[in-house]
Amino acid sequence: MSRICQVTGKKAMVGNNVSHSKRRTKRKFYPNLFVKKYYLPEEERWISLKISASGIRLISKNGLTKVLKEAKEKGYILNY
């Protein structure tokens, strides 16, 4: 599975490594991802999400069902 957050849609960005002499070489900035299990009380089951740290904070703030609904509308998550 790719390194994409299933809630926020964050994925790797491209940038430069800059040396002391200002030479630039390409590099990637990866999101801070975790595999975390959440319990869905409506469906009485556990789901496993690959989620970024900001996605965890978003679930804590807004609630799991609301965040999953928004992620599904935006196309970040196909089925959960």
Image (tube, grey):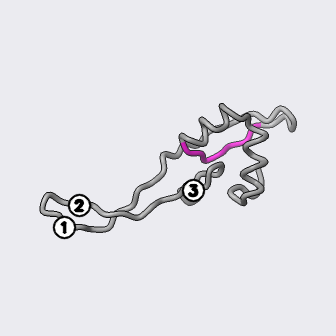
Q: Which residue is drawn at 17% across and 64% down?
A: 22
**Residue 32 % position (x, y):** 48, 46
Task: Identify the residue under disc 2.
Answer: 18
The residue most toward the left is 21
Q: Which residue is drawn at 52% across and 46% down?
A: 33
Location of residue 17 with respect to 42 vertically, above or below: below
Neighbour tally class for label 1: few under 14, some 14-19, many 20 plus, Cα within 10 Å: few
Task: Please tell me whether residue 49 belongs to the stretch shown in magenta.
Answer: yes
Numbered disc 2: secondary structure: strand
Q: Earlier in the sequence, mark 1 or mark 2?
A: 2
Q: Residue at x 32, y 67 (%)?
A: 26
**Residue 42 % position (x, y):** 87, 35
Task: Identify the residue under disc 3.
Answer: 4
The answer to whether marks 3 and 2 mark residues whose Cβ atoms lie closer than 8 Å is: no
Neighbour tally class for label 2: few under 14, some 14-19, many 20 plus, Cα within 10 Å: few
**Residue 10 % position (x, y):** 56, 54
The answer to which quarter of the image holds residue 9 is: bottom right
The answer to whether marks 1 and 3 mark residues whose Cβ atoms lie closer than 8 Å is: no
Location of residue 59 with respect to 75 vertically, above or below: above
Indicate the amino acid at tag 3.
Ile
Q: Main secondary structure of the magenta part?
A: strand
Q: How far apart are marks 1 and 3 (CA)?
A: 29 Å
Q: Which of marks 1 and 3 is nearer the N terminus?
A: 3
Between 26 and 42, the one lying in front of the other is 26
Q: What stretch is highlighted in magenta?
A: 46-52
The answer to which quarter of the image holds residue 25 is: bottom left
Numbered disc 3: secondary structure: loop
The answer to whether marks 1 and 2 mark residues whose Cβ atoms lie closer than 8 Å is: yes
Q: Distance between the residues labelled 3 and 2?
A: 25 Å
Indicate the amino acid at tag 2.
Val
Task: Identify the residue under disc 1.
Answer: 23
Numbered disc 1: secondary structure: loop
